[in-house]
Image: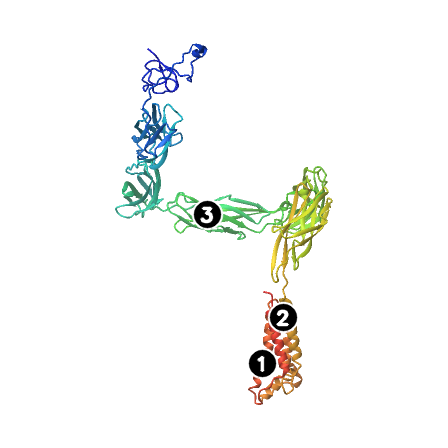
Amino acid sequence: MDSRVCSVCGERNPPGTEFCVQCQNYLGWDKSILAAPEDVRRRPEDQQSAAETRQIPRVTEQGPAPATDEDPDDLVADDRFRVAVDNPNVTVAPTGEVAELELRVRNISIRVDGYLAELAPGGGPDWLTVKSSAVELLPGTDEVIRARFQVVATTLTPAQQLTVRLRVRAMNEPLAVVELPVSVTVSVVDAPLQLRAEPRLLRVQDRADAAFTLTVDNSMSNRAISAQLAGTDPELAVRFGFDPPVVQVGPASVATVRVSVGADRPAPGQEASRLLTVSVREGTRTAETAVTFVQISSVQVEDPPVGITLEPAVIKVRDNPVGTTRLTLDNRNGREWAHVQLSASDPEQVVYVGFDTPQVHVPPGQTAQAQVRLQAALPELGTEASRTVTITATDPKRRTSTAVATFVQTASASPMTTLGLSLEPEITKVRDADGASTQLVIDNRKGRFRVRLRLSGADPERAVGFAFAPDVVDVEAGMVRRIEVRMAAWRPPPGQEWSRQITISATDGQASVQATGSLVQSSSRSAMETLTMRLDPSVLRLDRRRGAFSALVDNRNGVQPIRVTLSGDDPENCIRFSFAPAVLDVPPGGVGRSTVTVDAPGVGSGREVNRNFVIMASDGRADIQSNGTLVQQGGDWRPVARVLFTLFGGLLMFFGAFLEWTTEGRTGFGLSARFMTERFGFGLLLERRFDAFTSAGAAVALLAIVMVFGLTGRSGRLTRLAALAAAAVVVGVFVASAFSQQGMLIPSWGAIVVVAGCVLGYIGGLLVKR
């Protein structure tokens, strides 16, 4: 039987073969046996004998042409096939039931192929599976693929809606795929809520409240709930408390709630049992559970006295007038609260006893503690005093309890035993220095006598020199004194650090006290690390465009000479800097100075502008900088005008007092108090030699001086008040004369000069800088 030749690739296939073994082309369309054309790939044995190959003309019968797709919205995969779906939505049950989605696949290629649907890699969650049976389509035909969606999670999947990517692929062409989004909805599973109480029986004795744990079980439902809790009892005598009052329970989850209940205690020796109903409500779903609450009240029995103990019972102190102990009150055998009042006494009545809490409340079955403080005068030096103190605990409902404490005080023979010596700081660190200083603190607050001490210092290497200011010091009793300690030692090589232990001793000739510390010296690696720079002044105030200040480069902490280049910058780029000199050579331990001249744009009159700038010093590898501020102020004419108006007005007022104020020829000093009273027909009991001092001219002259003195103030208020007062004097004289028996005085040019001076002075008082 003859072999069948593929019309697409030219491969010879065994008789009866329906699909080409090389390209999987369907051979059923060929009605005749075909010979291989010239351009068909030859087999290995044919290539070895190419001369024997016969050229047979290709005879084929064309099969039906692939049908065209009339729906332009279908998804196409490389002109191989099309996929259409009417409703890309599917609802799956979380309990594992299968849901199907129909996909219509149309083969638009020229060969038979198979197709199947599956989830795209990473296109859906792990708990969702998609399976389908493969369909094989002839060219130009279509068929429905049923994709089966199923939830395979071991736990109940929460209700939700999500989008997955479904992939339809050709079985013979792995690269021909179509991916389409599918909306998957996990249906809601509603199940009754379950409520459990642990424990279900609450039994308390001599208590009004109890608590239990309530478990809200939503494990049979796949949606979250927010449930309201409530509780009741038939007698409505129980108080319920829920923590929290509204419980949030996730899907397929449980939640616990702390429930506290309380009710009045029954009578002594009685028992009360109540049935409690606790419910939870979520929408239309409710659940209830029952709890039994049993309260028992004991028969009242007289409580024993409160036990009282002291720890320690023997209080020993040395060179201290105060001792402390702890008092323990024991009510573990009692059934009621103990309300204890504490008191103390000693036979000699020389010990003062204090309690941090004089009244202590001890709950039943428990203990409480209080701090006891005993204080008495110290005995003589080198002696010991022992005193007995009785502590009493009184409760009105119980018998009184007592405890005995022994207070032993010892006074030391030498004041050095209470002397404290310390260094502040204990570790002294210096860099690039051959010396350092620290503070020696001599504490004699616990001593009773004055001590005279001689100070000295030492170190194991004997490399440190010590100096004290002073080296002999007197410290009074109850005082603390600080002494400066100066230490000198060679600094380490550059880049290294040395640490030396030091000991400071203080002796009174019989005993000594020591304090230990450390001296840590280090040397800098680079001069720039210790170099500092500052501006003098850092705030430059100018009332013009140009100004100058000094930039100081400080190498006093350095150990190496350094050369730096100075530069300046400002954020607005409106300031020009010039340095004299611009390059500084600063020796170790020295300070370099450069004059910096700045030129900035001017500002308007009465304005003030603040400009920040930075001066930098660089050695080519690193730089340091210092910030400065340039304050420019515009000129203000008001201070000068104020002075001129005030001075000129004061001069007019002062000299106007000596001029003629009236047409009768009277000056300001002629308008005395006597003259004015005589015009009204009254006499004045005052000698005539005082007339000039009681005249209007004298008042105006004095107010002129006060007005000028007002220039010393910043507000100008004194100047204005003095000008108004002087004007009031002048006007008052002429207004008062209008009511006299002799008629009104006619003002002359002297009064006008004074009033003009008042006006000028008042204007000067207004021209203050606000």
Quarter in which the C terminus is drawn:
bottom right
Between disc 2 and disc 3, whose residue precedes? 3
Q: How many marks?
A: 3
Among numbered discs 1 and 3, the one appearing first in the sequence: 3
Q: Secondary structure at mark 3?
A: strand
Residue drawn at point x = 61 percent, y = 57 percent = 609
Position of the N terminus, as image quadrant, is top left
Give the numbered dot on residue 710: 2
> In the image, is 117 to the left or to the right of 678?
left
- Could you tell me which residue is drawn at 61 percent across and 84 percent down? 747
Q: Nearer the viewer, mark 1 or mark 3?
A: 1
Rendering quarter of residue 678: bottom right
Indicate left or right for 456 with 8 as reference: right
Q: Measured from the top left, where is residue 628 in percent x and y?
A: 64, 52
Say few, some or many: other residues with alpha carbon within 10 Å of mark 2 (under 14 / 14 to 19 / 20 or more). Answer: many
* Residue 552: percent from left, percent from top: 70, 49
Q: Secondary structure at mark 2?
A: helix
Residue 760 in sight here: yes
Q: Residue at x 40, y 26 (%)?
A: 175
- Mark pair 1, 2: CA separation: 22 Å
Give, as a three-letter code, the residue at label 1: Val
| CB within 8 Å, label 1 to label 2 | no
Q: Nearer the viewer, residue 425 or 334?
A: 425
Circle 3 is placed at which residue position?
402
Q: Which comes sooner in the sequence, label 1 or label 2?
A: 2
Q: Nearer the viewer, residue 180 or 659?
A: 180
Density class for disc 1 (Cα within 10 Å; few <14, some 14-19, many ≥20) is: some
Q: Amino acid at mark 2?
A: Gly
Seen in the picture, residue 763 relative to 221 is either above or below; the reply is below
Q: Which residue is mark 1?
A: 731
Which mark is drawn over residue 72?
none
Please, is residue 184 above or below residue 665 in the view?
Answer: above
